[in-house]
């Protein structure tokens, strides 16, 4: 079994890495890794390396890098702008978005969100979600760690629209276009990044939809079924990945 661990890019110095206390504790006490064992260390920015546990540096493990592999960035960067969901649902969504290769996940406090976070709660949740994302890349071997947060309001989320080549909004409205057709047009134009807005349990308000359309968001349908918010996000990520790969 391959045992993976995460080390921040700045900790990669020369041929040795000193793991964080949390990663060291997990390897020693959960995975039962000992000096002389081999692991795969990932920096979340496309770099991974088989490494040998050379010993301990205080309470941290010291790894000796054996070789380094650098993964190229995907042709399409997918940025998920999801409504903040109730605890377990949001945790699950972060994990699955990581596994599906999302470049970032921006939690958005929308009008109909069930959960209302204050500033401290939002910061704490983002830190938790980042830890879940780190666990996700170790679990499935995804070489890139998505950028998580910070929690923002809907207007703040739309300020990110200019950073994407195209912004999609998952819509139940009659004017929503086929996701396949929209992605086909985007692929032909050489789009490199796409933002995907997914609403909360009670859907977007009419004001949020109007604001998104004013920011040039393109309404897309995910099919005839009304999906749960977390299911819609995962479906959209998977469908975009599939459609893009089928055209490459």
Image: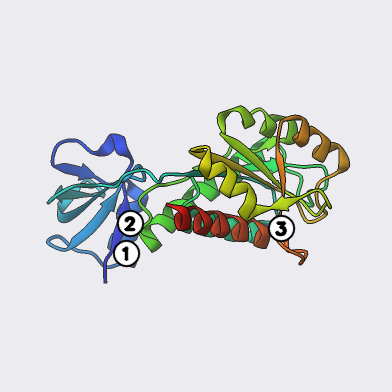
Label 3 Cα crowd, 10 Å radius (few <14 / some 14-19 / many 20+):
many
Q: Name the residue at 45% across, 55% down.
A: 245
Which residue matches tag 2? 25
Q: Nearer the viewer, mark 3 or mark 2?
A: 3
Q: Secondary structure at mark 1?
A: helix
Q: CA distance from mark 3 to mark 1?
A: 36 Å
Residue 45 x, y percent position in the rendering: 35, 42
Give the vertical position of 113 relative to 189 (above or below): below
Give the vertical position of 167 relative to 221 (above or below): above
First in sequence, mark 3 or 2: give its number.
Answer: 2
Label 1 Cα crowd, 10 Å radius (few <14 / some 14-19 / many 20+):
few
Q: Secondary structure at mark 2?
A: helix
Q: How is the image coloured?
A: rainbow
Quick check: marks 3 and 2 in contact, CB under 8 Å? no
Is residue 208 visible to the viewer in this orientation of the structure? yes
Task: Give the quarter of the image for residue 232.
Answer: bottom right
Q: CA distance from mark 2 to mark 1?
A: 6 Å
Residue 37 x, y percent position in the rendering: 16, 63
Work out which quarter of the rendered image holds the N terminus and state it. Answer: bottom left
Q: Name the residue at 23% across, 39% down.
A: 12
The residue closer to the viewer here, 217 or 188, is 188
Which residue matches tag 1? 29
Q: Nearer the viewer, mark 3 or mark 1?
A: 3
The residue closer to the viewer here, 240 or 43, is 240
The residue closer to the viewer here, 177 or 116, is 177
Quick check: marks 2 and 1 in contact, CB under 8 Å? yes
Label 2 Cα crowd, 10 Å radius (few <14 / some 14-19 / many 20+):
some
Which residue matches tag 3? 229
């Amino acid at each position: 079994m391959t045992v993976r661990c995460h080390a921040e890019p700045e900790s990669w110095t020369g041929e040795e890495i000193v793991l964080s206390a949390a990663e060291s504790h997990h390897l020693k006490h959960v995975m039962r890794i000992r000096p002389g064992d081999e692991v795969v260390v990932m920096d979340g920015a496309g770099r991974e390396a088989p490494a040998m546990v050379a010993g301990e540096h205080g309470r941290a493990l010291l790894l000796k890098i054996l070789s380094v592999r650098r993964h190229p960035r995907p042709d399409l960067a997918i940025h998920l702008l999801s409504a903040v969901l109730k605890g377990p649902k949001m945790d699950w969504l972060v994990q699955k978005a990581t596994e599906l290769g999302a470049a970032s996940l921006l939690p958005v406090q929308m009008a109909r969100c069930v959960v209302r976070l204050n500033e401290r709660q939002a910061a704490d949740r983002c830190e938790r979600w980042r830890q879940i994302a780190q666990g996700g890349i170790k679990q499935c071997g995804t070489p890139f760690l998505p950028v998580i947060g910070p929690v923002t309001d809907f207007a703040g989320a739309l300020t990110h629209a200019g950073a994407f080549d195209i912004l999609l909004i998952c819509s139940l409205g009659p004017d929503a276009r086929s996701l396949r057709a929209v992605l086909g047009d985007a692929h032909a134009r050489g789009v490199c990044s796409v933002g995907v807005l997914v609403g909360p349990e009670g859907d977007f308000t009419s004001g949020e939809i109007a604001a998104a359309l004013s920011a040039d968001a393109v309404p897309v349908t995910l099919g005839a079924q009304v999906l749960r918010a977390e299911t819609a996000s995962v479906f959209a990520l998977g469908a975009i990945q599939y459609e893009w790969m089928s055209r490459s």
